[in-house]
Image (spheres, rainbow, N blue to C red):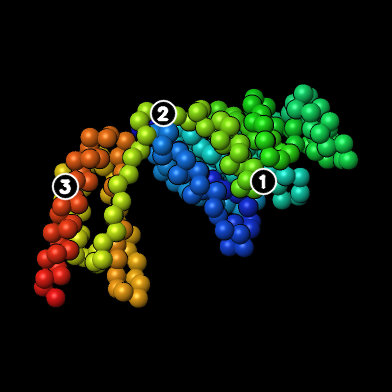
Amino acid sequence: MATASILTIGNELVSGDVPNTNGSWLAKRLAPLGVSVRMLAALPDEIEQIAEFVRDEAARVDFLLVTGGLGGTPDDLTREAIARAFGVEQVEQPELAAGLRARFTRDPDYVARWAQLPAGSRALPNPRGGAPGFAIDNVYVLPGLPSEMEAMFDAIFEEFRRGSPIGAWRRVYRTRESEIAPAMVEAGERWPRVLIGSYPSFGPDGPHVEVVVKSSDADELRDASEWLEAELQRSVNSAADGR
């Protein structure tokens, strides 16, 4: 199964001033393409920290998706950081710069800086904005503004398709995790390649647990979820009878 990590960049994200929605959005879009996300990370606008992360993480996964830091303000340092990670210079792409100058005639020199991409990069058009994204090796760099990021990803999503989609089965039970844990442990032992998770919550009517089963193997997903659903219902009924 192909793997990916997602890095979102911005001081506003690590400080909590802005919610980090890009990582979750991308992870949900990658699963149907057969790509499993192994990490979601956020870093401040610091060149060396970004470059170190990119060098290390890109070697571990099939795809590293990076969002943020592509504008023209002083804290938009992603192009420089990715160039540093790959040990290359930033080079203006003439056709890209000319297109930007033609589109943004009020300040053409300002927007032309967006065309200074790491050497060896492939520019990714921005359908809803100005600053282009780019891809270099297995690293894809997208804008941080969600509307622009989503439109750019939707334009290139087929580049990420690998193998079978990762399917999911979900159920919510009115119970506690401790009451269904044995069944989940056994399911994990029976189907070790299937991902099984539980997410508790507490509301006015008591505790609830959402159980999620994921796999790119449709047969294993069906077998594991059917077995687990029956076992969980027995556990829930047994706990209710004992109250």
Name the residue carrying label 1.
Answer: 69
- Label 2 neighbour load within 10 Å: few <14, some 14-19, many 20+: some
Q: Which amino acid type is marked by label 2?
A: Arg
Q: Where 184 sits versus 6, above or below?
A: below
Q: Helix or strand or loop: what does disc 1 sit on?
A: loop
Q: Quadrant of residue 166?
A: top left
Q: Helix or strand or loop: what does disc 2 sit on?
A: loop
Name the residue carrying label 3.
Answer: 227
Which badge, 2 or 1, is on the more N-terminal residue? 1
Q: Are marks 3 and 1 in contact (CB under 8 Å)?
A: no
- Label 1 neighbour load within 10 Å: few <14, some 14-19, many 20+: many
- Which one is in front, 185 or 75? 185
Q: Which percent across, then down, holds residue 175?
A: 24, 66
- Label 3 neighbour load within 10 Å: few <14, some 14-19, many 20+: few
Please report the residue visible at 30 percent of the width from the left and 39 percent of the height from the top.
215
Q: Are marks 2 and 1 in contact (CB under 8 Å)?
A: no
Which badge, 3 or 1, is on the more N-terminal residue? 1
Name the residue carrying label 2.
Answer: 162
Q: Which percent across, then down, holds residue 203?
A: 35, 72
Which mark's residue is nearer the viewer, 2 or 1?
2
Q: Which amino acid type is marked by label 3?
A: Trp
Q: How many marks?
A: 3
Is residue 83 visible in the rendered structure shown here?
Answer: no
